[in-house]
């Protein structure tokens, strides 16, 4: 896809000719790009961002590729240890950082001061106080011409959880990401002139995709600093939001917000949800509360530039609903091909469960600095998702299980092996298994089963505190049980299905 328009060109073309085209946005992006080049940032160099959501974050999504650099959004919920790994892994020349996160990561940034230039988002005084370049200085630079990167050029590195405790830097191309966003818009998402709510964090690819679709629509991105149920409802009403991306937990929290008023959603036309299964009760409640809204479910992952399948609104109601198709994960989008395969990579028949494979221009370029994992994941032209699923005779995908043993809590992907790795470092832990158990608020929560070392007097609070020093708070166990032994298979592997059984009896993950 060499010749496919790049990110910057695509966004600028989308608003060309508009009387209210945001010239100031493009001017700011061009000036930041000029400043980056003056710092020696060359095409292909990485530029990272560590911040909560803001208007500046949107500008940086344009400015960094405008300079020819590669965007690397960092997770603002990570611990300093996790941020240190990502910085050392992608080796950015420049890091744009908000003052609060610069303070929280002060030691990590100080240790890398010789090879990392900091630009402080926010007030100039914040930059001076932290020895960083103020963002206001970047905006004084002469604007640069667009570097013109496009097609298969590397656009961004998005970090996602690693099954071995090491995060993976997913490399996405200009063509793959922009093409995926365009294809989603072709089916009716984020239509021309939309006012799109961006409330998920912008280090998440899904939020970046929603923001990008809004720009490609010549629309308005209504960017929230973070999610608060009451505040989000007010923002939707006050800003006249027409389209939104929400994870199921957010939808449930909106419904449960004190004084919930459906009238505040009166101008919303579509809601796209994903990242975790939607509890059927939650789906029923929101559809009853706002029957005028059209719902789309998206299934995908960072490695496929966001979305592989979409479940359109008509599958949520009527005959499709009666047939249970609302529980599906959707049909492949136009640029994506699916295959359900056995463990030899051979296609299985309709209705049989196998691994979900994806092929198409949306598939990632690979994992940054991890060639062996890239080769394992990208085989024979297919992206091996590690998810289990089946398709029916109509080609509708149903997700059956997560083969990588991932926990999805409140829309956040948490890998059990990473949590197990942190817990196993505690001197009083002999064995550990981490599983997903049902949670009324978060859909799933992290639950640890521990076998303590003989004579140890370890407790739940101590183990959670131990984890918080090593991994982000949302990854830490929300519940812990202690056993004298773990169930093992004949091969000596922990049988997690047996551990899960008592918790999931009578529950549905809304998957088949």
Image (tube, grey):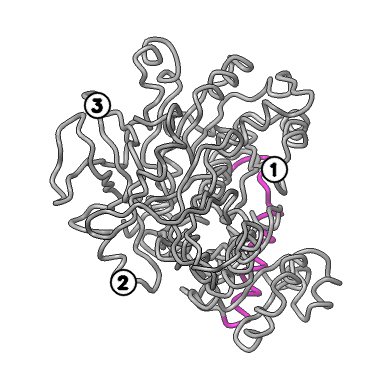
The count of marks equals 3
Region in magenta:
17-40
Earlier-in-chain disc, 1 versus 3: 1
Marks 1/3 in contact by CB < 8 Å: the verdict is no
Please, which residue is most extreme toward the front here? Answer: 455
- Spatial CA distance of label 3 from label 2 is 35 Å
Q: Residue furthest bottom?
A: 114
The location of residue 148, given as percent across then percent down, is: 47, 64
Q: CA distance from mark 2 to mark 1?
A: 36 Å
Q: Is residue 264 left or right of residue 508?
A: right
> What residue would you read off at disc 3?
392
Q: Which residue is mark 1?
A: 227
Residue 38: say if magenta: yes
**Element under disc 3:** loop
* Relative vertical location of residue 384 with respect to residue 455 in this rendering, above or below: above
Q: Is residue 255 magenta?
A: no
**Which of pointers 2 and 1 lies earlier in the amino acid sequence?**
1
Going by the image, does 367 lie left or right of 102? left
Q: Position of residue 427 (x, y in %)?
A: 54, 73
Q: CA distance from mark 1 to mark 3?
A: 36 Å
Disc marking residue 172 = none
Residue 415 vs residue 234: left or right? left
Q: What kind of element bears circle 1?
A: loop
Residue 14 shows in this picture: no
């Amino acid at each position: 896809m060499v010749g496919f328009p790049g990110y910057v060109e695509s966004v600028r073309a989308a608003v060309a000719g508009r009387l209210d085209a945001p010239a100031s946005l493009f001017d700011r992006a061009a000036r930041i790009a000029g400043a980056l080049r003056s710092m020696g940032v060359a095409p292909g160099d990485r530029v990272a961002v560590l911040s909560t959501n803001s208007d500046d974050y949107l500008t940086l999504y344009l400015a960094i590729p405008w300079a020819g650099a590669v965007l690397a959004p960092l997770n603002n919920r990570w611990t300093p240890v996790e941020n240190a790994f990502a910085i050392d892994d992608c080796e950015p020349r420049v890091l744009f950082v908000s003052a609060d996160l610069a303070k929280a990561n002060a030691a990590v940034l100080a240790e890398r001061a010789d090879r990392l230039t900091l630009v402080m988002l926010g007030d100039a005084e914040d930059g001076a106080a932290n020895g960083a370049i103020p963002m206001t200085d970047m905006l004084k630079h002469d604007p640069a011409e667009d570097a013109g990167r496009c097609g298969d050029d590397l656009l961004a590195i998005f970090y996602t959880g690693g099954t071995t405790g090491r995060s993976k830097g997913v490399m996405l191309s200009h063509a793959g990401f922009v093409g995926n966003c365009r294809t989603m818009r072709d089916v009716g998402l984020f239509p021309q002139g939309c006012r799109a709510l961006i409330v998920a964090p912008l280090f998440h690819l899904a939020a970046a995709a929603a923001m990008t679709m809004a720009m490609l629509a010549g629309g308005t991105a209504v960017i929230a600093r973070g999610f608060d149920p009451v505040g989000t409802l007010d923002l939707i009403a006050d800003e006249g939001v027409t389209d939104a991306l929400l994870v199921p937990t957010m939808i449930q929290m909106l419904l449960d917000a004190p004084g919930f008023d459906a009238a505040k959603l009166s101008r919303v036309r579509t809601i796209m949800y994903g990242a975790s299964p939607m509890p059927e009760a939650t789906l029923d409640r929101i559809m009853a509360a706002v029957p005028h809204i059209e719902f789309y479910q998206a299934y995908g992952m960072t490695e496929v530039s966001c979305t592989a399948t979409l479940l359109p609104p008509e599958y949520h109601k009527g005959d499709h609903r009666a047939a249970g198709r609302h529980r599906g994960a959707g049909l492949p989008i136009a640029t994506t091909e699916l295959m359900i395969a056995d463990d030899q990579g051979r296609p299985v028949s309709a209705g049989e469960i196998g691994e979900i494979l994806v092929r198409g221009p949306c598939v990632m370029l690979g994992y940054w600095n991890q060639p062996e994992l890239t080769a394992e994941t990208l085989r024979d032209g297919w992206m091996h998702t590690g998810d289990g699923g089946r398709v029916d005779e109509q080609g509708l995908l149903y997700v059956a299980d997560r083969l990588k043993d991932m926990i999805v809590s409140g829309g956040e992907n948490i890998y059990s092996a990473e949590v197990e790795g942190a817990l196993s470092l505690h001197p009083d832990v002999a064995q550990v298994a981490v599983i997903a158990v049902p949670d009324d608020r978060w859909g799933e929560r992290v639950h640890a089963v521990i076998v303590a070392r003989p004579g140890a007097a370890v407790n739940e609070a101590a183990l959670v505190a131990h984890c918080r020093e090593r991994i982000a708070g949302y990854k830490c166990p929300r519940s812990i049980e202690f056993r004298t032994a773990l169930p093992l298979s004949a091969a000596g592997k922990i049988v997690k299905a047996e551990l899960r059984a008592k918790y999931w009896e009578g529950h549905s993950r809304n998957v088949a």
